[in-house]
Image (cartoon, rainbow, N blue to C red):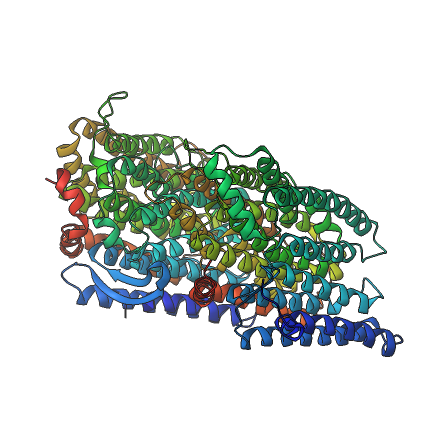
């Protein structure tokens, strides 16, 4: 073990430190100087400080190209973690900007503080390969998200959703911790790499899986399956998506997804290396791969079919999120370098589209008083720019080219098939995924039909679109189109980062 | 240069969205100019490109890490279909001159659709082809759902889902082929040369072929076609029947058949109901489509359903022509794509724009007593001419195309020729019946004069009708114009795999 200087450690964690400082600054500013001002002013200033903090952290990550692994994976820094952290910070900025025009709370400072703390949790989460740090960061993230969900104190649904989220979350954390403790017992270490080598050694001596390892695999999958909202651990998702204040929901649906999927991949692929098994048709070998293949298939089926019958747009997005989690799990099932790239591309572009969709929902909600399908009737004539953006987001989620979602799907599916060289063993999962994405077009078109085809109800007034909200949504829509037409912009970056990190 | 057909259409769509709400007239003119420009480019390229061989238009790296290129190329087959797209685009706009409701959006979706269709016909890289192929779905949906008539939302959704399921099948096949071939290139030529193992081709061929053929109206996957055509506004039905169904047939020929020729040719080794290979299966389905479409068209009450089912019947000729696998049958199939595109466009224009927009009914029993041959004689004459062309009278494009396909079928499947003959005869009958019932009052029935009197046929309508009839007659009298480029294209190395099998 190499001794490391405190100053060095601080330097390594500088991006996180910047965000924490920004969070404290937001809180101090709001509590000390802005108490008497209107919510809007307070939100604007708090968002500005928060965005500056995040931007500062991004800048630091971009400029310093560090490669470090402190204390056996407690804190890891390499181009790949930097890339993911930059994406997370960008999404945090979008989430605070979307919240500028909201009026659901008086506790502005605390709200923005929690978003930033959750961001710090996610940054540590992706920058670690040690079970303890992973668990602690996951708890920091989850606790912040529970409160963010409950933040709309005037709404009973918000509290209900938060309670559900909290109870399910506590349960899944217990599962996760149980699995982690078994892993520690098996390997006498909390470092993913050491756990993997211990499992690998056992595996050579005895090809059958150790029963403790089987339990560890299952409980770990349950714990992370909850975080990424994969069926059958998804029960919190529809309620949280529906009840939480729009910016919180957007943040939970995007940034938290990115971080959870990244660390899910790391834990399974690095930590359980040697216990993969095989999910290829008629060549099933037990291990974590077949478990994930089943969870993926189940998520895709459940998410896509239940989304069809939803009449609330947020619930619809929640079920579509479950379906998308199923697609993304395929990348973990494939567990190759290319599939990691595909996963990152998919989850980032998915998060962009979801953030945008929630941005639009936030505006529609404050202006029309709800987010039922009928609230979107004739939106195209009342808010043409917003409608065009929603058009882009939903079609990207459906996987229509030339939008980012399509390339994400294509690359993901291609990488899943390439993962079993010489045979097309995973074709069954792929065929299921593609067939179900055809189903998904139906419910996305249901929303777009409301926006473009239905005529607005006669008493509907025009919609006042806030400037910042619209600007953010337009930028996101532009990004979705750009990444769809020129996927190489992001892909090249991801591939280089993966290569440089030697994964 | 040819790539500008795509860009100019997309640009036109974008500019139309930015126009102020009130300027309906300028929107029409802008759309028309865009379509004319696209056609002019296609025509120039056609005139310059006499040999019909594959010619690269644009080639640039797109996603280098996956070996995907932005590669546009054209050969005789694509050029023929590009011309068709140009003509249909122009006449479709002429026939939707009366659109007032959200006109900018209408023409914008319309041009988006046209641009994507040009894109499919020009793509050489299969990833690119798929991108354009899927872009087509969305404007199609909105054109029907917003501006359509009878059960428009149902028809639109059905069409969108059928198309999307078809393209999902195609996507599975394409990804599998791409990965199987080493995941290095998506170019059509590279994949067509890769020797895919036989067992792979045996499932990939029917998957991709059916995926495309859904859009070409292959029986029994044709049911989107009549409902979609009927629900669509005139211009959209013209596009659907005129070019979108051709996308499916083009995909069958260009992608499914060139990539997996063994899957098409190799016998299964056993006979199920007398069918020994995928070729037999699809030939039989195509013939069923021809006869079934014609029979159903014969008993329709709704004028537009007659034309909708006639499309299914005529597209059966295209698919059957593809299955003959001899030069005359294949060239006939491509010629039939062109011919049916023109004629179906014309028939839908008469029914949707000239008749329905004036009388607001398509019920044949109600139309008869109106004596439309007196009220709007131009429509009656146009329908008679279009009907004659459609039933395959010599002198029109339909005759040459169907004759070539039939000769091809005679060589490949002599038994099926009889069924094709039946289909042609029924084809004469349903056109005759529709013509009689819609335009000429029966003796003894008291004729009704519609009130208020029907507005006369406008100039844009006349222009569009003349354009379409003129094209059909030109090709009917001098088919060599197109065949000169189609035949060399079919003889190109791309189709080597098929030729090695049973090219005669």
The residue nearer to you, when weighing B63 against A197, is A197
Q: Can residue A268 be seen by looking at this rendering? A: no
Q: Position of residue A346 (x, y in %)?
A: 51, 56
Question: Where, by quadrant of the figure, is residue B444 drawn?
Answer: top left
> Which residue is at a point 76% across and 53% down the rendered structure image?
A146
Task: Identify the image quadrant of the N terminus of chain A.
Answer: bottom right
Percent from the top left, x then y, of residue A302?
59, 38
Is residue A72 positioned above or below B223 on the image? Answer: below
Q: Between A431 and B498, which is closer to the camera in this rendering?
A: A431
Q: Residue at x 58, y 46 (%)?
A: A443
Q: How many marks?
A: 0
Q: Residue at x 59, y 45 (%)?
A: A187
Residue B474 location in percent, x, y?
A: 20, 55
Residue at screen point 35% across, 47% down: B174
In this picture, is B193 found above or below A425? Answer: below
Q: Residue furthest right?
A: A36
**Is residue B134 rendered to the left or right of residue A61?**
left
């Amino acid at each position: 073990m190499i001794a490391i200087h405190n100053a060095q450690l601080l330097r390594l964690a500088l991006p996180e430190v910047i965000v924490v400082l920004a969070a404290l600054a937001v809180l101090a500013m709001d509590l000390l100087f802005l108490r008497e001002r209107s919510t809007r002013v307070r939100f604007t200033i708090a968002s500005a400080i928060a965005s500056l903090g995040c931007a500062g952290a991004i800048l630091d990550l971009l400029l310093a190209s560090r490669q470090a692994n402190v204390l056996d994976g407690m804190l890891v820094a390499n181009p790949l973690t930097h890339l993911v952290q930059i994406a997370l910070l960008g999404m945090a900025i979008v989430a605070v900007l979307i919240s500028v025009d909201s009026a659901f709370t008086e506790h502005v400072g605390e709200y923005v503080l929690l978003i930033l703390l959750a961001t710090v949790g996610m940054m540590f989460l992706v920058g670690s390969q040690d079970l303890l740090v992973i668990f602690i960061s996951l708890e920091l993230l989850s606790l912040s998200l529970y409160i963010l969900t409950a933040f709309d104190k005037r709404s009973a649904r918000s509290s209900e959703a938060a309670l559900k989220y909290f109870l399910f979350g506590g349960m899944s954390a217990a599962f996760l911790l149980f699995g982690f403790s078994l892993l520690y017992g098996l390997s006498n270490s909390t470092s993913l790499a050491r756990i993997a080598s211990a499992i690998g050694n056992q595996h050579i001596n005895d090809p059958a899986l150790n029963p403790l390892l089987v339990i560890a695999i299952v409980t770990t999958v349950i714990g992370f399956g909850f975080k990424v909202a994969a069926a059958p651990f998804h029960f919190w998702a529809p309620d949280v998506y529906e009840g939480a204040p729009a910016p919180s929901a957007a943040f939970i649906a995007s940034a938290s997804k990115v971080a959870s999927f990244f660390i899910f991949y790391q834990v399974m692929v690095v930590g359980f290396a040697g216990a993969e098994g095989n999910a290829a048709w008629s060549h099933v070998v037990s291990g974590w791969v077949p478990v994930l293949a089943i969870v993926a298939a189940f998520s895709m089926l459940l998410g896509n079919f239940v989304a069809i019958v939803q009449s609330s747009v947020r619930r619809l997005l929640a079920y579509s999120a479950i379906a998308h989690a199923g697609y993304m799990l395929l990348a973990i099932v494939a567990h190759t370098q290319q599939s990691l790239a595909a996963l990152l591309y998919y989850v980032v572009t998915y998060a962009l589209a979801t953030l945008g969709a929630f941005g639009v929902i936030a505006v529609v909600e404050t202006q029309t008083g709800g987010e039922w399908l009928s609230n979107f009737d004739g939106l195209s004539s009342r808010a043409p720019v917003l409608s065009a953006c929603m058009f882009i987001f939903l079609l990207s989620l459906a996987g229509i080219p030339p939008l980012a979602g399509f390339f994400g799907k294509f690359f993901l599916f291609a990488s899943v098939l390439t993962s079993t060289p010489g045979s097309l063993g995973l074709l069954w999962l792929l065929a299921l995924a593609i067939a179900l994405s055809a189903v998904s077009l139906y419910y996305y078109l249901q929303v777009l039909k409301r926006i473009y085809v239905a005529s607005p109800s006669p008493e509907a007034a025009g919609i006042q679109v806030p400037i910042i909200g619209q600007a953010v949504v337009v930028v996101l829509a532009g990004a979705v189109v750009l990444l769809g037409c020129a996927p190489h912009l992001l892909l090249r970056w991801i591939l280089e980062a993966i290569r440089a990190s030697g994964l | 240069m040819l790539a500008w057909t795509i860009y100019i259409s997309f640009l036109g769509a974008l500019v139309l969205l930015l126009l102020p709400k009130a300027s309906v007239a300028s929107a029409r003119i802008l759309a028309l100019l865009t379509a004319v420009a696209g056609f002019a480019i296609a025509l120039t390229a056609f005139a310059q490109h006499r040999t019909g061989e594959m010619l690269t238009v644009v080639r640039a790296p797109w996603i280098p890490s996956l070996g995907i290129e932005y590669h546009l190329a054209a050969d005789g087959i694509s050029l023929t279909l590009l011309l068709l797209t140009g003509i249909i685009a122009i006449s479709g706009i002429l026939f939707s001159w009366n659109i007032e409701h959200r006109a900018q959006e209408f023409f914008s979706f319309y041009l988006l659709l046209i641009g994507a269709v040009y894109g499919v016909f020009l793509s050489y890289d299969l990833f690119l082809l798929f991108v354009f192929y899927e872009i087509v779905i969305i404007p199609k949906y909105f054109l029907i759902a917003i501006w359509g008539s009878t059960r428009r939302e149902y028809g639109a959704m059905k069409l969108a889902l059928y198309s999307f399921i078809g393209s999902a099948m195609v996507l599975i096949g394409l990804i599998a082929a791409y990965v199987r071939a080493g995941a290095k290139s998506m170019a059509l030529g590279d994949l067509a040369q890769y020797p895919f193992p036989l067992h792979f081709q045996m499932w990939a061929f029917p998957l991709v072929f059916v995926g495309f053929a859904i859009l070409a109206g292959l029986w029994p996957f044709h049911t989107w076609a009549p409902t979609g055509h009927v629900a669509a506004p005139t211009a959209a039905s013209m596009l659907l029947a005129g070019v979108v169904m051709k996308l499916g047939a083009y995909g069958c020929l260009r992608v499914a058949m060139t990539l997996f020729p063994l899957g098409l040719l190799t016998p299964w080794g056993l006979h199920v109901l007398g069918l020994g290979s995928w070729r037999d299966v699809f030939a039989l389905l195509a013939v069923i489509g021809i006869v079934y479409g014609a029979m159903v068209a014969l008993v329709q009450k709704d004028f537009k359903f007659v034309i909708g089912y006639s499309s299914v019947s005529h597209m059966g000729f295209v698919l059957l022509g593809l299955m003959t696998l001899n030069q005359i049958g294949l060239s006939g199939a491509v010629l039939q794509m062109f011919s049916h595109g023109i004629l179906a466009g014309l028939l839908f224009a008469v029914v949707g724009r000239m008749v329905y927009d004036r009388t607001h009914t398509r019920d044949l029993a109600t139309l008869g007593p109106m004596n439309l041959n007196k009220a709007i004689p131009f429509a009656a004459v146009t329908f008679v001419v279009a009907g004659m062309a459609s039933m395959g009278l010599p002198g029109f494009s339909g005759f040459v195309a169907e004759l070539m396909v039939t000769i091809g079928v005679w060589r490949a499947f002599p038994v099926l020729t009889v069924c094709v003959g039946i289909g042609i005869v029924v084809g004469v009958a349903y056109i005759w019946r529709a013509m009689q019932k819609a335009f000429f009052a029966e003796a003894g029935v008291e004729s009704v004069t519609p009130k208020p009197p029907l507005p006369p046929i406008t100039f844009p309508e006349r222009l569009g009708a003349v354009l379409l009839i003129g094209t059909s007659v030109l090709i009917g009298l001098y088919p060599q114009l197109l065949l000169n480029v189609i035949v060399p294209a079919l003889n190109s190395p791309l189709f080597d795999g098929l030729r090695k099998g049973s090219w005669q």
